[in-house]
Structure formats: structure tokens, C-alpha cells
Amino acid sequence: MTSIPPESTTTGLVIRIDARRCHVEIEGEVHLLVPRGRLFEDRRSVKNPIAVGDRVRVLLDAEAGGTIDEVLPRRNKLARSSAGEGTREQIMVANLDQVLVVASIAEPAFRSQMVDRIVAGAEREGLLVRIVLNKVDLEQDLTGATTGGVLPSEHWANFYESLGYTCLRASATTGVGIEALRERLCDHLTVLCGMSGVGKSSLLNAIDPELKLRVGLVSVRGRREGRHTTTHTSLSRLSGGGHVVDTPGVRNFGLFGLDPREVAELFVEMRPFLGTCNFDDCSHTHEPKCPIRAAVEDNAIAGSRYDAYKELLAEAKAGHL
């Protein structure tokens, strides 16, 4: 272990947070450090002043261990409304290169609106988004009229790729898509985000067995809702290069402090129509001569995406009352 001078200042990378103690990687070694109390003085709008992925300035002490003095400026973040209360911003990860939105085709069932919410959160920060449709080994009996008679993963992959998003079909059980995912994670800092039980940790273990992340079986109830296995957001170094952040499963993904006028910008297929409505303050929900509404009626904008837009718009309006 590297010797620590009696007192020294340096910078490090936050890789995990337990209560008010942070695991900080400094020159390849992990130190358990306590943040200065002043970092927690103003928590009216932000739930966690320090997030995984933050670069921090720390004061190391050979006897006391050390403290975090400052959070360095972030280049971006993936954030949502704080779980349960919804009155503050909860920063999930900072300083990202890309977001992998993971959704399972079955056990639990695919929910496009959850995918759309997380994608909107990434779009808000200008983050690169890729969508992973997991557990494709479970879908052989899931073809139906709603997917045009094709496999659901193929249907949804074609749909999101038509919007410009890279979409990967994967299975940790059979190995489908694992090599493609491994290539896209190399030399990047990537967060995996999705519902409980969609298989984020299992995918990461298949990509890099050295991670040895804890996984669990999906319960009968969890086949619909999923079950938490990952309990902490944690950053891990990949043996092939790069870092990944495994996050606890989310049951909801609200966007904190969202301006109602901002919502349509988060949906790529709506952007070409913005500024062409009959009313400058058009909400695209009920006004006449709205090109976005017309595009929905003509199936140029998918009903599932429009529903996700209306939900986020309603939440944004409620937050601005």
C-alpha cells in the first residue's frame, strides 16, 4: 500500500457511497473518506451532494484517514426526482460517457414508458444513449398482434433504431449480444439503468466475470415488477478497460425541476415540429392545428411515446404550480 504523508491534498474518483462515507479511488487504491459537513448544508433541492462518478478534492491524513473537501465541477449527470418524496433531485451518476437503458423482454415484462423516461433523462443532459433488450432467451412464445407477429425484441429494436438509438438484443444466459456490449463498454464510463429484475448485474457478470456482482432469482411477484439485488450504486473497473456503474432497479423515473416547455425537446421525433404550431405556448395535447398531434394521428409519432410525453408534461406542470 502506498504510504500516506502526515497530511496531503489530492483528487480522487467516488466509486461508492455508504450513508455519509464515500469509497474514493486514488491512484488505484480505495480510501473510505468522510465528506466535510459543509457539503451537506444546502440539501433543499439536491438529495445527494456527492454522487458516484464525481471527481473530488480530498485531504488525506495518515492517522485520521481523510476527508472530502470539495466536489469538482461535473461535465454531466444522470439524475431523477428523489425516490419516494420527489421534492429533490437525486443524482444517480456523474461524469458519464454513455447510458445503457436496460429493459427485459420478459420477467419482468417490457415497459416502453420506463425506457422512454430514462431516455428523456439522458437526452436532457445530452448523453449518448443505447438501449439493451435483455432476456431474449425468454421470448420465443411472446409473438403477437401487438408486435406485428415478430419477436418483441425485434419489434422494439426496430422501433427505437428508427428514432436513432442503438438497440442491442442480449441474454446473459445464452451469450447473445454479450460481445457487442463488451465492445461498446470498453474505455468508457457507462451507467446501466432500468427496472428491478431486468438483469443488469447478470449482464455485467457475463461481460466481465471478474466483477462477480451479486445477482438474485426473480420471484413470482417479481416476474411483473422485478426485485432489487443491487442495493448500492457502485462503479467498477472493467478488466478490458473502462468503468461501469451498476444501479439499483428503479420503479419510477421522474425528472426533477423539469420546465413544461422543455419536455417536447426530450423526444427526438417531436423536435422537427417544434416552432411550427399555431400557438407559441402549444402543449401539443389539445390545441387545434398542432402538427405534433397530427403526427400522432398519422402514426408518424408512436402512441407509446406520445403517452410518455404527456405523463412527463403533467408531472412537469404539477412541479411548477
Image: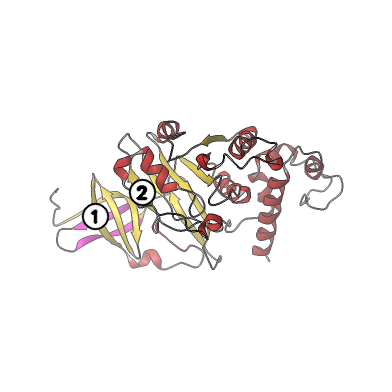
**Mark 1, secondary structure of its residue:** strand
Percent coordinates x, y for residue 314 in the rendering:
70, 59
Label 1 packing within 10 angstroms: few (<14), some (14-19), many (20+):
some
Q: Which mark is residue 31?
A: 1
Tell me the distance, in whole angstroms, between the alpha carbons under discs 2 and 1. 14 Å
User: Residue flagged by tag 2: what amino acid is it?
Assistant: Leu
> For the C terminus, which image quadrant?
bottom right
Q: Which mark is residue 152?
A: none
Q: Which mark is residue 235?
A: 2
**Mark 2, secondary structure of its residue:** strand
Which tag is nearer the camera, tag 2 or tag 1?
Answer: 2
Which residue is at a point 69% across and 47% down the rendered structure image? 304
Q: Residue furthest right?
A: 288
Percent coordinates x, y for residue 302 in the rendering:
72, 42
Magenta stretch? 46-70
Relative to residue 266, is residue 27 drawn left or right?
Answer: left
Relative to residue 146, is residue 7 drawn left or right?
Answer: left
Q: Is residue 276 above or below residue 197?
A: above
Relative to residue 155, is residue 172 drawn left or right?
Answer: left
Closer to the camera in the image, 187 or 211 = 211
Which residue is at a point 68% across and 56% down the rendered structure image? 311
Q: Earlier in the sequence, mark 2 or mark 1?
A: 1
User: Residue flagged by tag 1: what amino acid is it?
Assistant: His
